[in-house]
Image (spheres, rainbow, N blue to C red):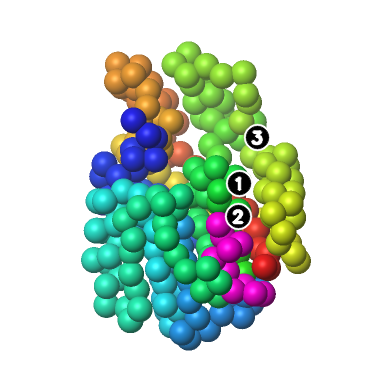
Amino acid sequence: MDKRFSFNADAVKYDKFRPRYCKELFDDIMRYSDIKKDSKALEIGIGTGQATKPFLDIGCKVEGVELGDNMARFVFERYKGYEGFSVKNCSFEDYNGRVGSFDIVYSATAFHWIPENIGFNKVYSLLKNNGTVALFWNRPFAAKADDPLHCEIQRIYSVYRPSENKPVENNEKIFAKIIESLNVYGFSDVQMKLYHKTRTFDSDDYISLLNTYSDHMALDEDVRLKLERELKAAIISFGNTITVYDNMDLYLARK
């Protein structure tokens, strides 16, 4: 199954446990883009709408694109009271928007699912001249080197989901690649910013959070359940609290 559909299974749980983005990130988008009431916005991979309300609140006419039917229904019900809000239940690859019609196209922790040549070229064509693209991600990190609980979690993962790739909190290679792609596909005035915040969970809620991530849901069920049991026991042994460090990277550019 296409991993992108895994998020569609439980929209309510996804909405409850996935993080929101910080106000400063949206403030920077609004300043850069100068969007305002009646500006036309396209959100790629709208999900349950964690990144949508700031645009609706200033009066933007937001159209969302969402592959999952449950997600599309959820977010439409959430924001249907806003004038000009709509959702297309399709992939961005299949989305048929009018060329040069949007003041801003944005995507929150979703754009990496789209093949690069399709995604960047299509965004460019959909934007008005001087329109803004805003791409941003939340990359939660739970592996501080000096934190005994996080070290134990990494040990557990090495048993059930071994990988030669070590967790990197701020991956400069990823940042540089996105900036390079924006330049290669014709965008200008490229800017990048970082934001940080933390969240705390008890063991049950942390496992619920993990079950909103495609790589965790894709594990063999027996392996996944054993992994979850050991993770839960480790968190409980350290006071039943775990801190997740949210690192958000934002990329802004103009057509």
Spatial CA distance of label 1 from label 3 is 26 Å
On screen, residue 241 versus residue 188, left or right, reads: left
Asked where in the image residue 225 lies, by quadrant, the reply is top left
Report if residue 106 is visible in the image. Answer: yes
Provide residue 209's location: percent of width, then percent of height.
Answer: 37, 41
Residue depicted at 30% across the width and 16% down the height = 222
Q: Which amino acid does label 1 sit on?
A: Asn
- 46 or 23: nearer the eye? 46
Instruction: Determine the secondary structure under disc 1.
Output: helix
Q: Does the magenta stretch include residue 127?
A: yes
Residues at marks 2 and 3 touching, judged by CB atoms closer than 8 Å: no
Instruction: Determine the secondary structure under disc 3.
Output: loop
Nearest to viewer (mark 1 / mark 3): 1
Of the residues under marks 1 and 3, which one precedes in the sequence?
A: 1
Instruction: Determine the secondary structure under disc 2.
Output: helix
On screen, residue 133 versus residue 221, left or right, reads: right
Q: Is residue 119 above or below residue 99?
A: above
Spatial CA distance of label 2 from label 3 is 29 Å
Q: What stretch is highlighted in magenta?
A: 121-131
Residue depicted at 50% across the width and 56% down the height = 108
Q: Which amino acid does label 2 sit on?
A: Asn
- 146 or 87: nearer the eye? 87
Circle 3 packing at 10 Å, graded few (<14), some (14-19), many (20+), is few
Nearest to viewer (mark 2 / mark 3): 2
On screen, residue 151 versus residue 160, left or right, reads: right
Q: Name the residue under label 3.
A: 168
Q: Mark 1 points at which residue?
A: 117
